[in-house]
Image: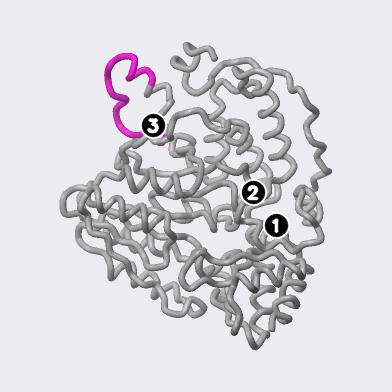
């Protein structure tokens, strides 16, 4: 690699493209207005109803082709960068910003939601006496990240309960619970957009509006920052960051967005409140290092961890954003929720099934969780697989059987899943 190019212009900038050594995989014809055509972009076995595609999500044909193109070019020439891309990471930020409704300079690039949350909760600057508020329903990545933050800073972390029965979750009660848990020095409010434990969709916008009122009159350094684990809403729902009103949104792009595995983003509008915890490979970092100074105020680029990544995956992220945009974010949300509603309606009619996810579309997304009377969730997953229905188990205590409806499932597969669950006796 030409190190001077790297040091002077940032990550792998200005290098010429190499020829690929293998023929990229053929792309099936893509009609974004036809759900069958959308489904055909995936290499998933059509014999199975895919209700766990969000776990280690498959990539559609344009993303797979981009990964293969970059991988082959890097294998042929380790100084390769995409043609015409002076700064390939900037192109990724621009694509993410268009999809999110933010600005490229607000986007940090990560490897996963967990890494994004770690960058936030390890880097947020807390003053003496400030505290953190979260919920009992959040995932390991949030709870553990905040526990480690408390260990380092001495800050108190409080947890509130948003609902007792998830199927009867209420938006007003959820907002009220967060409001009641606030203290005068609460600096961080950490919530999850869609709970992977129950499928409950949290009213992030309403919480943001409540916090805006609570922040009136507070010193800027004491303003409560709303930090959101968005992974099970990002790509499934159409909301952009302006719709959500949060201060930070962390998400992997390899789940409901169906982007390359091992990629993610953090969008933020308050990066000056976060200290980088891993050296960045940005141009500002290298220039400051060479000059014996510090880069200055935190930015999303400075918080983006440096190091050499699986660039064939990172540089294929724009194709994932373009694929979903071509289908239409509103159409994706409509399809996801239409299928989820069909599934919930079907499961509700089965006597030995207890639905955990709210039936109201405004309180759920694509996750549908339930329990089967007298049967452990993992046994249910195994028996459903034998019926060609692929589901998953929530990694919580107690665990639940979990389905995910998305652009890779069909109404017929939903009916197939309902019939298979009815046969679990």
> To which residue does mark 3 refer?
302
- In three-dimensional space, the C-alpha distance between marks 1 and 2, rounded to whole angstroms, equals 10 Å
The residue nearer to you, when weighing 391 against 95, is 391
Q: Earlier in the sequence, mark 3 or mark 1?
A: 3
Tell me, for residue 92, which label it has, or none: none
Q: Position of residue 211 (x, y in %)?
A: 32, 60
Q: Position of residue 401 (x, y in %)?
A: 59, 71
Give the position of the N terminus as an image quadrant.
Answer: top right
Q: Earlier in the sequence, mark 2 or mark 3?
A: 2
Q: Is residue 369 located in the magenta-colored stretch of the structure?
A: no
> To which residue does mark 1 refer?
407
**Considering the numbered disc 2 on the image, is that residue within a helix, a strand or a loop?**
loop
Magenta residues, as a range?
286-300
Task: Check whether the beta carbons of the residues at disc 2 and disc 3 lie within 8 A of each other.
Answer: no
Mark 2 residue crowding within 10 angstroms, few (<14) / some (14–19) / many (20+): many
Residue at x 79% of width, y 36% of height: 25
Q: Earlier in the sequence, mark 1 or mark 2?
A: 2
In terms of image quadrants, where is residue 64? top right
The residue nearer to you, when weighing 381 against 349, is 381
In terms of image quadrants, where is residue 233? bottom right
Residue at x 54% of width, y 76% of height: 356
Tell me, for residue 258, which label it has, or none: 2
Give the position of the C terminus as an image quadrant.
Answer: bottom right
**Considering the numbered disc 3 on the image, is that residue within a helix, a strand or a loop?**
helix
Q: Position of residue 46 (x, y in %)?
A: 80, 58
């Amino acid at each position: 690699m030409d190190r001077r190019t790297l040091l002077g212009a940032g990550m792998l900038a200005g290098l010429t493209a190499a020829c690929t050594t293998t023929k990229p995989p053929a792309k099936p014809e893509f009609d974004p207005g036809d759900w069958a055509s959308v489904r055909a972009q995936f290499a998933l076995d059509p014999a199975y109803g895919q209700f766990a595609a969000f776990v280690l999500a498959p990539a559609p044909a344009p993303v797979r082709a981009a990964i293969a193109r970059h991988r082959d070019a890097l294998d042929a020439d380790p100084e390769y960068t995409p043609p015409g891309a002076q700064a390939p990471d900037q192109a990724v930020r621009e694509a993410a910003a268009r999809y999110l409704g933010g600005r490229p300079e607000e986007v940090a690039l990560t490897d996963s939601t967990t890494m994004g949350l770690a960058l936030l909760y390890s880097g947020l600057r807390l003053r003496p006496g400030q505290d953190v508020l979260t919920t009992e329903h959040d995932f390991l990545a949030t709870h553990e990240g905040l526990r480690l933050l408390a260990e380092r800073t001495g800050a108190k972390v409080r947890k509130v309960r948003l609902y007792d029965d998830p199927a009867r979750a209420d938006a007003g009660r959820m907002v009220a619970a967060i409001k009641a848990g606030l203290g005068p020095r609460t600096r961080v409010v950490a919530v999850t957009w869609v709970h992977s434990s129950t499928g409950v969709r949290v009213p992030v916008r309403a919480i943001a509006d409540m916090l805006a009122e609570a922040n009136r009159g507070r010193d800027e350094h004491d303003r409560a920052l709303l930090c959101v684990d968005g992974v099970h809403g990002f790509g499934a729902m159409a909301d952009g960051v302006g719709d959500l009103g949060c201060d930070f949104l962390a998400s992997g792009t390899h789940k409901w967005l169906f982007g390359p595995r091992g990629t993610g983003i953090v969008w933020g509008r308050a990066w000056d409140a976060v200290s980088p915890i891993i050296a960045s490979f940005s141009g500002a970092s290298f220039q400051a290092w060479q000059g014996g100074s510090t880069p200055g105020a935190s930015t999303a680029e400075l918080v983006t961890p440096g190091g050499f990544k699986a660039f064939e995956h990172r540089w294929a992220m724009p194709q994932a954003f373009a694929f979903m945009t071509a289908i239409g974010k509103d159409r994706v949300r409509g399809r996801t929720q239409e299928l989820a509603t069909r599934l919930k309606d079907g499961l509700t009619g089965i006597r030995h099934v207890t639905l955990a996810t709210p039936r109201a579309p405004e309180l759920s997304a694509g996750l549908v969780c339930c329990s089967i009377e007298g049967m452990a969730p993992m046994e249910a997953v195994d028996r459903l697989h034998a019926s060609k229905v692929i589901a998953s188990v929530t990694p919580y205590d107690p665990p639940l059987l979990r389905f995910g409806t998305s652009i890779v499932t069909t109404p017929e597969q939903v009916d197939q899943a309902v019939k298979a669950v009815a046969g679990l006796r």
